[in-house]
Amino acid sequence: MSRATPVDRNDYAHFQPITTRWSDNDAYGHVNNVVYYNWFDTIVNTFLIHHGQLDIAHGAVICLVIETGCTYFSAVAFPDAITVGLRVTSLGNSSVRYEVGIFRGDATVPSAQGHFVHVCVDRASRQPTPLPAALRLLLQSLVRNADAAPRSNTIPPHTRKTPT
């Protein structure tokens, strides 16, 4: 398996500073891997909420994570100041692939980069549904280097339509 190539800071469309916390460090003296996934969720959900595209309590359409991954290039540790970069590399009918870069200070190369794929589903039925038009328009503003990323066609069992 080949190692991922770091994506330059300039290839991300949106940025958000995040403060590392003392409790983010693990016994090895660096930020634990699970914290990175929290940062991925934070930048995406903050972006969607800020732009009025995520109503976690009452929205008819919700987005579920069906795939995620992260590659680490260098350690991050408290009290590092980090900036998280966000871009979209694939928009499907009901899915979106986000890519996230974790940058220490003003670094142009990420300490880590990850991805996750959301699939939009109807809140009640949990069946895949097309991305709402306003959400699609917003996500298009984040699209960068869309041809370079693989597209996931996976739909998790709890959102798959069952035969009747």
Image (tube, rainbow, N blue to C red):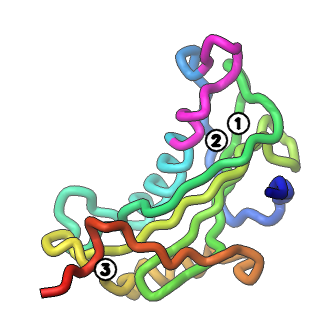
Instruction: Name the residue type under label 3.
Output: Pro
* Relative side of 103 to 36, left or right: right
- Do the numbered discs 2 and 1 sit on residues whose CB atoms are within 8 Å? yes
Measure the C-alpha gap from mark 2 to mark 3: 32 Å
* 18 up-or-down from 90: above or below: above
- Prevailing secondary structure of the magenta residues: loop
Measure the C-alpha gap from mark 2 to mark 1: 6 Å
* 11 up-or-down from 46: above or below: below
User: Which label sits on residue 17?
Assistant: 2
Q: Position of residue 122 (x, y in %)?
A: 22, 76
Magenta residue span: 25-37
Reading the image, the residue beneath label 3 is 128
Residue 68 occupies quadrant: bottom right
Instruction: Name the residue type under label 1.
Output: Ile
Q: Position of residue 127 (x, y in %)?
A: 24, 78
Numbered disc 3: secondary structure: loop
Instruction: Name the residue type under label 2.
Output: Pro
* 76 up-or-down from 164: above or below: above
Q: Quadrant of the N terminus?
A: bottom right
Q: Disc 2 vs disc 3: which is toward the camera?
A: 3
Q: Can you see residue 9? A: no
Q: Can you see residue 28? A: yes
Q: Which residue appears at 84% of the width and 57% of the height?
A: 2
Q: Which residue appears at 50% of the width and 61% of the height?
A: 67
